[in-house]
Image (cartoon, rainbow, N blue to C red):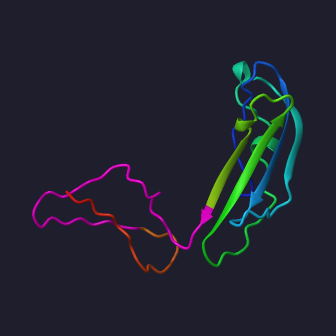
Amino acid sequence: MKTTYSTVIRNNHNAVKNGSFTYAIYDELGTQVNTTYSGGNINIDPYNPNGNLAYAPFTSPALNYAIPTLVDSSVYTIECAVNSTPDFYRANDTIRYAQEFANYYSYDDGSAESALGLSTLYAQLAEKFTVTTADTLRCIDIFLIQF
């Protein structure tokens, strides 16, 4: 598991804003499982012409929580917020990311980016899966498109 969290932060205002950064981690029941991280306060320059913020305590803070050994699937949500005063549009100050830990391996994200088909009678197709660690394969779930 990663030991740092990374994000991109920018000040869309045309003036320097003093901001603070915090994050918290929640389990699947919504219970906070870490001590709220605070990156302190700094002046954040406007995105134009300075670009994204490059301040590690805000953009790459150390994670202050270790996920316990999992016995089954779990979801942890990390919630990050940048606060500044005065702030006229607070809705864009917080991001949430749900990290799922599951008891299965997914070859992809489950969405179809493309498809292929075999149009010849008695055609065959093979797929090779390479594993880097010895494990047990119990099932395969493949969606076949009907033409």
Is residue 26 toward the left or the right of residue 19 in the image?
A: left
- Determine the residue positioned at 42% across, 54% down: 111
Residue 45 percent coordinates (x, y): 80, 25
Quarter location, residue 129: bottom left
In this rendering, the answer to whether 103 lies above or below 61 is below
Q: Residue furthest left?
A: 121
Tally of numbered discs:
0
Residue 140 percent coordinates (x, y): 39, 73
In this rendering, the answer to whether 114 lies above or below 92 is below
Is residue 133 toward the left or the right of residue 93 in the image?
A: left
**Foreground of the two, 75 or 45:** 75
**Foreground of the two, 141 or 86:** 86
- Determine the residue positioned at 44% across, 78% down: 137
- Determine the residue positioned at 74% across, 31% down: 89
- Determine the residue positioned at 79% across, 50% down: 23
Q: Is residue 118 magenta?
A: yes
Q: Please tell me whether the stretch drawn in magenta is mainly helix, strand or loop.
A: loop
Q: Quadrant of the C terminus?
A: bottom left
Q: Is residue 99 magenta?
A: no
Residue 68 percent coordinates (x, y): 73, 72
Q: Which residues are magenta?
A: 100-129
Residue 47 percent coordinates (x, y): 72, 24
Q: Quadrant of the N terminus?
A: bottom right
In this rendering, the answer to whether 78 lies above or below 55 is below
Is residue 74 toward the left or the right of residue 113 in the image?
A: right
Quarter location, residue 107: bottom left
